[in-house]
Structures are given as structure tokens and as C-alpha cells.
């Protein structure tokens, strides 16, 4: 253990000694299962993939492919997934703070961190057709914008454990830094394969990524964003299913499965991803239905409002952004300030929005029903865990 001047002599002594860093087995040309995928696990993966595609079709059909709420619905699903992925790293943020952070109105450090994860997820979906090292580095750079090591493979040893001083006793000691480039090159080659079920492929790739731990920070969130890049790029999903919520719902089983993978047993991580996919499909469907029902209820409140009123254009946006400011609305819809204020006033008068600050300037308006639905979903995930 190096002497950085901060640790006591006894702490340095306790942290000094031999350790064994992991060197993951190559995947590019290997068969994750030999000689073949067990029948029961193959069926489990197939069922989970069917659940995801059914959810995907339902989310689109529930609104209609040309519905202006479909984009906002996709955005809120992605934000929900990002929040769950961040919560796995003990970064918990409520729906209100997250929505405030999207319009630069939150002072919560956690909310800003989760919004960075949202941007990472967005980049994952945008870059899904090009799953190479540059894409992985771009995801990490998006997550840790401004950090010294953002978008760079690590040049030091990292480990997973309680001690930040020494790897001794760590749950997982990642490969030595000099082994990371070759391990990542192998992983990228594995990503190119087209002969594996997509969900199994994503589960194995994720576990390998977390074993390599290629960055000094942000490995978990980047690795889960990579999963969504694969689900989109390999054609399984067009929307975002809250798979991380499924992992969060049984967090200890997920972390134990990663440990089992590092010990040479891939089955548990595949099982956990299959379970998480089914959870995502079932609970995601209920969330989509609840948000859609809320939108229909709000449309009823606008009965009698002239068809070309700006309020109708604002309504679907609330699904994806349930807190608005006049400046945000003006920018998003490219409308004059007076028009934005008039639409917000009209939606408030009709009971769709509530003014949330009580101030005369720099006000924000919120949709309490949508925020409650999102918080209820997060609470359901926590209860499941």
C-alpha cells in the first residue's frame, strides 16, 4: 500500500500484502455455455425477450405511433430507468427534483448526477448502431462530464469493497490497468456477435464489463447504459424498458450474480436479467397505462378549449416533463413568452397544473398527478427490494 501521507502506519500495515486481480476469460470467440445453452435457461430467456417485445408494442399502441405523447413517454421511461440505475449506486432522487433538474431549477447534487445518467442513456440509444470502444468511452464521458478521467480507460488498479486504501479484502479486484485495453478489445469483439439471444448477449456483456471495471468511476451506470444500447441496437426494443428497476428490486441477487460470474458461473446473471426483464415489462406496462390514463383525464379537462390553443401542445409534453417554467416552455415549443404564460395560466385554471413556488417571478408549474405516479412507481420498486 503506497504512503500518501493520509493513512496511519497501522492502516498501511493492514493494507499491505499480496492480492489477486481478476483476469476475465476472453469472450469474443467463446461459447458462454458449453456445449449449449441449457433448455430451461433458453426458455427463460425467450420468455423474457417476448415480455420485452410485448411491452414495447404495447407502449407504442397505447398512444399510437403518431401521438405527440409518444416521445415524452419514451423520455419518462428512459428517465425512470436512469433513476433506477443510479439508485443501484445509492443515488436516490424523487421525481420532482429530477424534473426540476431537467429545467435547471434543482439544487440537489444527486439530481444533477442522475440527469448526467439520463444523458448517458440517451447517448446509448443514439449510438446503439455502433457498439465499439469509442461508443463506450463516449457513454462514460457523457456520464462524468468535466471529470479528469471522463471517457478514458483507467491507468490504476480499482476494486469493489469498503476500503478505499487497499484492495485487500475487496469483494472484487478488477484486472490490472495494463490488462484493460486488451480485455475491452475482446469485449467489443463479443458485442459484434449475432449468434446469441439478445438478452443473454446483453447480460453476459454487462457482467464482463463490470468484471473488467474499465474506469475509475461510473462503471455500473455505464455498464447498464451499454445494456440498453444492445437492446436497442440488436433490435429487441424501440422504447426503454425499466430493466434497472428489475435489477434494483432484487439488488443483492444482482450483485451476487456478478460475483458468481467472476467465479466462472454465468447462469445467475442471465437469470437475473431474465427476471429483471419480466419485471420491467410488467411494471413498465402498468406505468405506461397509468400515465396514458392521466393524459386522457387531462384531455377531458380541456374540453371546450379551442383546438388550436397552445395548451393542447403542452399537454403531451407533461408526460415527459411534469414540471415546467415559462422559459423552458418558450424554448421547447419556440413560442413567444406571452403565449407560454397564457398556456400555463390556462392549464392552471383548468386544474391540470399547479404553480409550485408562490413567487411572482421565476415561477415553475407542476403536474402533481404525474409526479405522484412516478414516485409511486419508485416506491413499488423499493418495496420489491
Image (tube, rainbow, N blue to C red):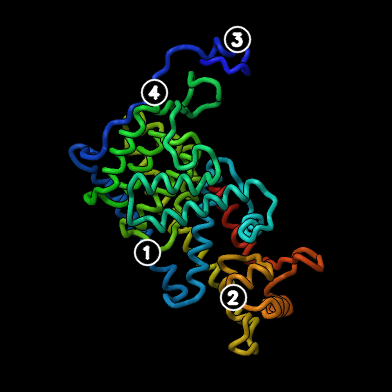
Mark on residue 21?
A: 4
The residue that mark 3 highlights is: 10
Question: N-terminal of the two: label 3 or label 1?
Answer: 3
Say whether marks 1 and 2 touch (CB < 8 Å). no
Residue 26 on image: x %, y %? 26, 34
Query: Residue 1 — which label?
Result: none
Give the percent coordinates (x, y) of residue 98.
62, 55
Q: For the point 60% across and 9% down, which residue is it?
A: 10
> What residue sits right under mark 1 in the picture?
54
SS state under label 4: loop
Q: Is residue 361 visible?
A: yes
Question: In the shown orientation, is residue 176 left or right of residue 78?
Answer: left
Q: Residue drawn 38% across and 68% down?
A: 57
- The local crowd at label 4, few if under 14, some if 14 to 19, many if 20 or more residues have their Cα within 10 Å, is some
Residue 121 at x, y percent in the picture: 47, 53
Whether residues under marks 4 and 2 lie with C-beta atoms below 8 angstroms apart, the answer is no
Q: Position of residue 344 (x, y in %)?
A: 69, 75
N-terminal label among 2 and 3: 3
- SS under mark 2: loop
Q: CA distance from mark 1 to mark 2?
A: 36 Å
SS for dot 1: helix
In this view, the mark in front (1 or 2): 2
Question: In the rendering, which numbered label is found on residue 334?
Answer: 2
Q: Marks 4/2: CA distance?
A: 54 Å
Q: Nearer the viewer, residue 138 or 316?
A: 138
Viewport quadrant of the C terminus: top right
Of the residues tagged 2 and 3, which is closer to the observer? 2
Q: CA distance from mark 2 to mark 3?
A: 63 Å
**Is 135 above or below relative to 350?**
above
How busy is the neighbourhood of tag 3: few (under 14 within 10 Å), some, or many (20 plus)?
few
- Residue 55 in view (yes/no): no
Amino acid at each position: 500500500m503506497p504512503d500518501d501521507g493520509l493513512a496511519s502506519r497501522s492502516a498501511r500495515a493492514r493494507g499491505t500484502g499480496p492480492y489477486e486481480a481478476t483476469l476475465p476469460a476472453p469472450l469474443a470467440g467463446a461459447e458462454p455455455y458449453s456445449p449449449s445453452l441449457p433448455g430451461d435457461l433458453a426458455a427463460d430467456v425467450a420468455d423474457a425477450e417476448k415480455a420485452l417485445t410485448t411491452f414495447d408494442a404495447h407502449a407504442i399502441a397505447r398512444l399510437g405511433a403518431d401521438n405527440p405523447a409518444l416521445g415524452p413517454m419514451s423520455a419518462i421511461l428512459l428517465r425512470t430507468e436512469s433513476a433506477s440505475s443510479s439508485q443501484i449506486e445509492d443515488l436516490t432522487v424523487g421525481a420532482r427534483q429530477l424534473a426540476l433538474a431537467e429545467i435547471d431549477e434543482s439544487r440537489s447534487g444527486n439530481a444533477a448526477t442522475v440527469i448526467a445518467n439520463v444523458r448517458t442513456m440517451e447517448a446509448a440509444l443514439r449510438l446503439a448502431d455502433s457498439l465499439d470502444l469509442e461508443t463506450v468511452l463516449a457513454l462514460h464521458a457523457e456520464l462524468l462530464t468535466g471529470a479528469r478521467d471522463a471517457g478514458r480507460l483507467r491507468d490504476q488498479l480499482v476494486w469493489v469493497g469498503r476500503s478505499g486504501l487497499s484492495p485487500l479484502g475487496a469483494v472484487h479486484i478488477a484486472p490490472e490497468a495494463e490488462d484493460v485495453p486488451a480485455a475491452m478489445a475482446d469485449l467489443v469483439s463479443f458485442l459484434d456477435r449475432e449468434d446469441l439471444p439478445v438478452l443473454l448477449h446483453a447480460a453476459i456483456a454487462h457482467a464482463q464489463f463490470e468484471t473488467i471495471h474499465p474506469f475509475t468511476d461510473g462503471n455500473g451506470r455505464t455498464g447498464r447504459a451499454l445494456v440498453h444500447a444492445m437492446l436497442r441496437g440488436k433490435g429487441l426494443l424501440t422504447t426503454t424498458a425499466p430493466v434497472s428497476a428489475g435489477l434494483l428490486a432484487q439488488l443483492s441477487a444482482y450483485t451476487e450474480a456478478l460475483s458468481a460470474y467472476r467465479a466462472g458461473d454465468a447462469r445467475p446473471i442471465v437469470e437475473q436479467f431474465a427476471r429483471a426483464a419480466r419485471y420491467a415489462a410488467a411494471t413498465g406496462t402498468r406505468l405506461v397505462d397509468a400515465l396514458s390514463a392521466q393524459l386522457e383525464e387531462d384531455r377531458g379537462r380541456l374540453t371546450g378549449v379551442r383546438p388550436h390553443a397552445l395548451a393542447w401542445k403542452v399537454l403531451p409534453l407533461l408526460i415527459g416533463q411534469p414540471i415546467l417554467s415559462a422559459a423552458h416552455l418558450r424554448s421547447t415549443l419556440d413560442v413567444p413568452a406571452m403565449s407560454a404564460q397564457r398556456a400555463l395560466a390556462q392549464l392552471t385554471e383548468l386544474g391540470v397544473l399547479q404553480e409550485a413556488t408562490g413567487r411572482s417571478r421565476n415561477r415553475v408549474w407542476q403536474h402533481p398527478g404525474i409526479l405522484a405516479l412516478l414516485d409511486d412507481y419508485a416506491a413499488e420498486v423499493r418495496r420489491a427490494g
